[in-house]
Structures are given as C-alpha cells and as structure tokens.
Amino acid sequence: MEAEKKYCAAPWRGLHLNFDGFVKTCCAGAPRVLQPLEGEENYTSDTTIEAILEGPGLAEVRASIKKGILHPRYCANCIKSEDAGFNSERDWHNNLSPDFNYETTNIYEHVPRLIDVRWNNTCNLACNYCDSHFSTKWASIIGAKVNQTIKTEYKHIIDYIEKHSMHVKEVAMVGGEPLMMKENDALLDILPDDVLVTVITNMTNDFDKMPVPQKLLNRSRVGWSMSFDNIGERFEYVRWGSTWKRLDENVTRVANKINNSNHHGGIQAVYNLYNCTRLCELKQYSLDKKITILWQHIHGDQLDPTKHNQAVRELALAEIQKFRDTFDIIEAEETWLENLEELLLQGNGNLDKEFKDMLCNVEDTWHPDQKGKFVKLWPELVQPLGL
C-alpha cells in the first residue's frame, strides 16, 4: 500500500525567528537542517536571512515535500505528533495557504504568509515555573546571561518582512514578553492593518507607557492570548514581579476590545499544582470579563497534579466536580476535563519531595519575599503535600 502523501506550505510560506539565533520556516522545524554548525554538511558562514531561506538545507526540505514526503529531520516534530494521533503545526500553515500549488512552485521560492517572531527573551517577570532561558528577569536573579537575541541583525529582518508585507496574512508575537520589545514596535509599523497579529503576553506591563500594546489596541485584527493561571495574591505569588491590580486593569481593557471589535482571544492558562484546587475562581473571573480560557497542561514534573499522591489527586478531582456543578461546560472544556479526570484517576506518582525542593528554592533562595506564602495561600494542600 502506497504511503499517504503529506504536504506542508511552511517551507515556502512561513518564517520563524528564534532568539536562540535560528531562522526557520516554522516553530516545529529542526534548526540545524537550515543552519548547520561549522564542520557539518552545507555549513556556511553567511547567516543572512536570504542565505538561509535560499540555502541548500531548505532546498532539500522543499524537494522532499514536493514529493509528498515530510523531511525526516526538519519535520521530525510534526511527524512524531501526527504518528501519535495529534494535530501538528503544519495544519496552521496549510490553513493559511489552502491554494498553494506544490507542483508548480520551485525549491527556492519564499513568500512568507505566516510569521512567528521571538526576537529575544526580554521579560519583566520571574514566574515560579519559568527559567532564565525565557526571561531576562530570571537571568538577572540567578546571574545568568541576561539577554539572548537573534544573531541576524533585526533591522535587516524588518526590511525583509516589509518587502513581502503585502503577502503576509498573520504574525505571531511571542517572547519573552513581546509587548516590551522595540523590534515589535518597528514590526507593527510596517504591517498592513488587515494582517492578523496574535500575541502571547503576560499582560503585566503599563500599557499607557509602552508603544507596542498601544499599537495593538489600535489595530483592526488582534488575537490576544493572555498568559496567567491564578487570580489575586495567588497570581502574584506564581507570576513573581507582577501586581494583580495592573493585570486586572489590562485584562479589562483587552476584554473590552474582544467584546466590541474584531479582536479575539482570552486567557491562556497552564493547569498545574498552583491552580488544581482553584479552577472555579479563574473560570468565574473569565465569565465576569466575558472572555474564554484555553487550557494547557504541565506534564511530568513536580507541578503536575497527576504525578502527586492520592490525597492531592483527590483534591484536584473534587475541584473538577465542583467546576462541573457550578458552570455550564462548553464542548472544549468537556474534552479537557474528561482527559484530566482520566489522568488523575490513573496517577500513581508521588513528587512531594521534588515539590518541597522547588518550594525551598523559590521561597528561601530566589524569592525570599514570598517566604511562607504558599502555606498561607494554599492551605488545602499543606497536609496532603506534607508541608
């Protein structure tokens, strides 16, 4: 039986800029295929954006996909995801280029429609479950390298995007914290107003003193992924360096745009130990603001409730039942809750020690102003975790 042919528009229609120094055509792509290290096949010292997008590495990827075969190295993440039965990033790219003709295109063409920009790891927060790789605030606390920036000079990349701006359909702004970045300020100036800009932001900066949020609020089409997982004091504990008052003010402004314009989006929350007993309060907050919540899950470490002891998992299951009893459940939530319940019921781990070690690092070493606050803010978890 002939293997199913699989195509992806990303090598011709995508552009991904990563602050580690790599230029790719999608977030999922393996970076060293396009930019080999010195001594590897196809290595070149020319790292301009044109040299990478017109180079032999990407030509090889395109030649494979023209035959309906995802490149085994460059496309490995999508292949793995699809083999496991999940969607992959190529769906996003193909949906933006439904009429792309793989037969007539050549292996050196590049006209970006979807751009994903991650200029650097500038961030104002040191969230408890983040690290210095994604946050300059964390880097300054632990004495690590403060800032990582893409190696290709950003003004040259802005010029490249401007040259193709009439073809761009969507730009995703990710960080670090994208609302703080001067590069995004310059990028917004050259994007036509009908381009959809999607942004993942912690929402904790002063919107009135920064140009990027002001420009986003004045655009016609913006998708807001507001990244937070708790409310009030618990929010301030997890998202260290922030204030709930500032976040709430900003969420109110963005929610008003979402509810009264072509803007869309909502809360992008991570399900973890810090909120597994507090789902209802975040849900109620979202309803009060008339915005949605998109849930993700931390897997496998000390913040994953499904990897803790039975007492913790029973508390998490009780909160899910309370969630069901309190709110009208939409279809997406039902699927998420069912999967979550199954994981909690099947769980048999006990990462109490690992969490205690993390708690000591957070409260004794990195954020001493938070000393004793976990016990105060999550009293229901004190006995189950043996604190």
Image (cartoon, rainbow, N blue to C red):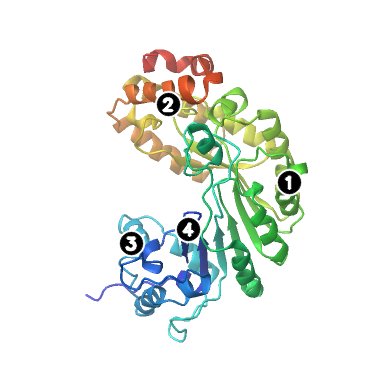
In terms of depth relative to the viewer, which is nearer, 65 or 160?
Answer: 160
**Residue 65, relative to residue 368: is it above or below?**
below
Whether residue 213 is visible, yes or no, is yes
Residue under label 1: 210
Label 1: how many Cα within 10 Å (few below 14, some 14–19, many 20+): some
- Name the spot of residue 144 as percent of width and height, x first: 47, 39
Disc tally is 4
> Which kind of residue does numbered mark 1 sit on?
Met
Residue under label 3: 76
Residue under label 2: 316
> Which kind of residue does numbered mark 4 sit on?
Gly
Q: Earlier in the sequence, mark 4 or mark 1?
A: 4
Question: SS of the residue at dot 2?
Answer: helix
Camera-near label (2 vs 3) is 3
> Which kind of residue does numbered mark 3 sit on?
Ala
Residue under label 4: 21
Label 4: how many Cα within 10 Å (few below 14, some 14–19, many 20+): some
Q: Earlier in the sequence, mark 3 or mark 4?
A: 4
In terms of depth relative to the viewer, which is nearer, 51 or 207?
Answer: 51
Label 2: how many Cα within 10 Å (few below 14, some 14–19, many 20+): many
In terms of depth relative to the viewer, which is nearer, 149 or 334?
Answer: 149
